[in-house]
Amino acid sequence: MLRCTGSQDLMEVRTEYLATVYRERPDLPIASTVTDAARYLQMLICDVPTIDLTAGFAHRVLKIYGKAPMYIPAEYFVRT
């Protein structure tokens, strides 16, 4: 979500999201300077002013991911 560069749509959504986050919370560190993306995301989720923004961002990201084909190795297919 915060590091992927494989989708132009995702990068545009992320840029828009982070610009809004930094307007709301200019005291937060810039995402690209943080080495642990999971911790940064955790911080955004735990922050009241950014939680709604982060939830909206996650929803948009999942819609982008949902449009892309997913490779699932044969050993993970559920057989009925």
Image (tube, rainbow, N blue to C red):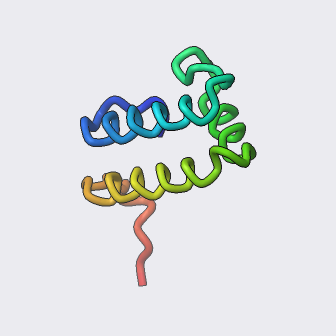
- Tell me the quadrant of the picture where the C terminus can be found: bottom left
- The spot of residue 52 in percent (x, y) is 59, 54
| 67 relative to 39 in the view: left or right | left
| 41 relative to 5 in the view: left or right | right
Q: Is residue 21 above or below residue 56?
A: above
- The spot of residue 65 in percent (x, y) is 35, 53
Q: How many labels were placed on the picture? A: 0
Q: Quadrant of residue 40?
A: top right
Q: In the orientation shown, which residue stands out farthest toward the top? A: 33
- The spot of residue 25 in percent (x, y) is 64, 31
- The spot of residue 48 in percent (x, y) is 72, 48
Q: In the orientation shown, which residue stands out farthest toward the front? A: 23
Q: Nearer the viewer, residue 62 or 49?
A: 49
Q: Is residue 65 above or below residue 40?
A: below
Q: Is residue 42 above or below residue 74?
A: above
Q: Quadrant of residue 6?
A: top left
